[in-house]
Image (cartoon, rainbow, N blue to C red):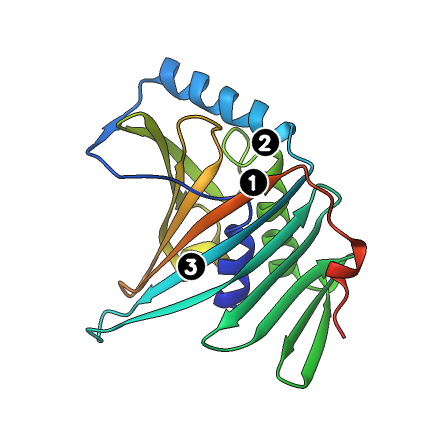
Amino acid sequence: MKKIFFILVSIVLCLGAQAALTKATPAQSKAMIARINRTAASIKTISCNFTQTKKMSFLNDKMVSHGRMYYTSAGRLRWEYTSPYSYIFVINNGRVTMKSGKKTSQVNISSSRLFQSIARIMVNSVTGKSLSSNKDFAVAMYTSGSSYVAYLTPKTGDMKKMFKSVRLYFNSTGSMVSRVVMIEKNGDSTTIDLTNVRTNGNINASVFSVR
């Protein structure tokens, strides 16, 4: 279930170089969120590559995986790991479809409270509502050089069980997320970087079908 949340929370994300963080004033936070919201509202589709780095507190090595992500404002998402293993996760028409090897499974989002919460977080992040009206996280805004950083602290029981915090790093030009860092309760962390991001291009509907 954590992997599913990592996938969804990571929709529409990404950043550049990190510098020292400075907490934004209330006025600055309002202006930053308004800018992010305007950018998010203009996005109809996203396609990009991603690199996911998992660091476990009891291991020195990092686990790195790569893949491809597609998203449309109609609420459809395809998150596909291509290396070092194959795994596909698709949201389409109110259903989540997961495929690992030859095994495929489906979940109806409406039948699970946690899936409803995850879907809401995903959609809110894409539309820009996740920072200004977030039921699941308390939000604090920071600046990192010319970029923005949002620290999300869980408010709900389900999220508190999984995360200590979620950090979204936004680029300075398009106000889009470029990196997501998820810190778990046990100290493990997952970092997802998006690259080769294209917005508002044509995405064939077949991308959101799993065969």
Q: Quadrant of residue 149?
A: top left
Helix, strand, or loop for circle 1? helix
**Which quadrant holds the C terminus?**
bottom right
Tag nearer the camera, 2 or 3: 3
Q: Position of residue 193 (x, y in %)?
A: 41, 51
Helix, strand, or loop for circle 3? strand
Q: Quadrant of residue 28?
A: top left
- Badges 1 and 2: C-beta atoms under 8 Å apart? yes
For the question of whether residue 110 can be seen, the reply is no
Q: Nearer the viewer, residue 158 or 66?
A: 66
Measure the C-alpha gap from mark 1 to mark 2. Answer: 8 Å
Q: Which mark is residue 40?
A: 2
Label 1 sits on residue: 125
Left or right relative to 66: residue 103: right
Residue type of the residue flagged with mark 3: Thr
Residue type of the residue flagged with mark 2: Ala
Tag nearer the camera, 1 or 3: 3
Measure the C-alpha gap from mark 2 to mark 3. Answer: 22 Å
Residue found at x 65% / y 28% = 42
Q: Earlier in the sequence, mark 2 or mark 3?
A: 2
Residue type of the residue flagged with mark 1: Ser
- Badges 2 and 3: C-beta atoms under 8 Å apart? no
Q: Which mark is residue 51?
A: 3
Residue found at x 50% / y 47% = 196
Q: Which mark is residue 110?
A: none
Residue found at x 22% / y 35% = 19
